[in-house]
Amino acid sequence: MTMNNNLPLVDYTPSKSVKEARCGNNKFSDDIWDFKGFVEAPHWNDAKFRIDFTSFIQWESIKITIKKYIHSELLMNGFNSVKRKHSAFKQLVDFLNENQSIESFQDFTDNTIREYFQYLLKAISERGTPLSPMSIKKSAQVVKELLIRGGQRDWEVPINTTKINSIYNELIINNKTLKEGTKFGVTNKVLPEEEVINSLIKTAREQLEKGEDILTSASILLSTQLGLRISEVVLIQEGCLSVINGEYQITYLTSKTQKTPERVTRPANEIVVEAIRALEKHSKPLIRQFGEPCEQDGVCLGCHEFIASARHLPVYEARLERVEQELNTLDNDKSIYTTKLRFQQGMLKKYVSDLQKKLAEKEFQEALLEVAGAKHDE
């Protein structure tokens, strides 16, 4: 099947109802969304490309709200990550069957949420064994996120969701058994105490306010709030913040969910917005200050922000001459260094040719003006 690489997994238009949205090859109203052609996985069978909501068909309101949650996740995350979150709703079906009075997420009072989290702690998997600590955490997490996000976006959930996080932390995050059960492998690493992390975040925010250590402080804040690697932090671009449904979102490149980097969008809290604003202010004077080519031996060549200035044409010509001389001495060498030189050669030829043409046109126009001026004087 042809890959729809130019289309997002789902559509979103703020002016229209989400119920009109496209979801992969289907519409939001369909109970099975098929993403074959949107996800590059030739070894998968057809079922793996689908997200199926039919298990909630007898709870229409709950089904629609879960669809809205999954739709919002597909706007922000990779397909595999969203599939795992969708799978985490399996335990909810059993809980609903045991609690027939629940017809929508609006019935999830604080007591109901507590009951559901306690139910997960004792739930049995399809294999007849207790749920793994990770499955319990994931199953609780998706319901918690759905309720809180739904409260912000006017979904059919309780109006007041302020206590959900504290119940989640009490029964799930701070549960000693779950903590022990989600340690992966043996490690000698000692994680910093929460007090140390909070102090680090406080210091970083203070430095931003003072306008000092901007890069370091912003990196600390983005890493702690979003879980970004340093390689992802340095690739964040200007204009990465947007507002969707009244909430700040940040878009950046990550390779955590796919082998090749992909662009994802996630919610941005006050600290993230603060860090990005500080970075934008700090980098503003540096934008578009080019010419002399940078000291990194031309790595900026080909960058979409690079501007070839006509007044530096002699510099580009001299650099092109040096690159070509070096390539002549390397003959048929196929090393990475030679490949880099050939790339520089191609970009420099383009800049030199374009600038020579522009200068020639400018000189021609100036000559015409001189002739016109001379005739006028006669």
Image (tube, rainbow, N blue to C red):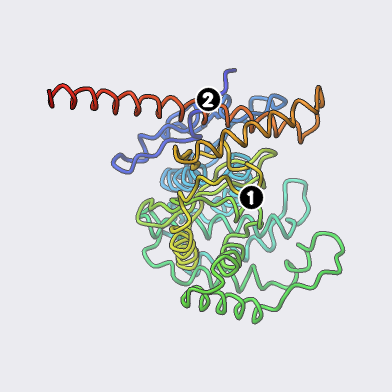
- What x and y, as percent, mark residue 373? 18, 27
Q: CA distance from mark 1 to mark 2?
A: 40 Å
- 30 or 295, which is in the foreground? 295
Which label sits in the foreground, 1 or 2?
1
Q: Residue at x 19, y 23 (%)?
A: 372
The amino acid on which the numbered mark 2 sits, given as a three-letter code, is Asn
Check disc 1 and report its element: helix, strand or loop. Answer: loop
- What x and y, as percent, mark residue 94? 60, 50
Return the disc, 1 or 2, that comes first in the chain's sequence.
2
Hey, which residue is sitting farthest front in the picture?
378
The amino acid on which the numbered mark 1 sits, given as a three-letter code, is Glu
- 321 or 28, which is in the foreground? 321
Q: Which mark is residue 163?
A: none
- What x and y, as percent, mark residue 19? 36, 38
Q: Which residue is mark 1?
A: 295
127 up-or-down from 345: above or below: below
Q: Residue at x 59, y 64 (%)?
A: 219
2 up-or-down from 6: above or below: above
- What x and y, as percent, mark residue 288? 45, 49
Check disc 2 and report its element: helix, strand or loop. Answer: loop
Quarter occupied by residue 298:
top right
Please give left or right for residue 15 compared with residue 78 in the image: left
- 189 or 167, which is in the foreground? 189
Please give left or right for residue 326 compared with residue 138 in the image: right
203 up-or-down from 355: above or below: below
Q: Which residue is mark 2?
A: 4
Q: Residues within 10 Å of mark 1 (few under 14, many from 20)?
A: few
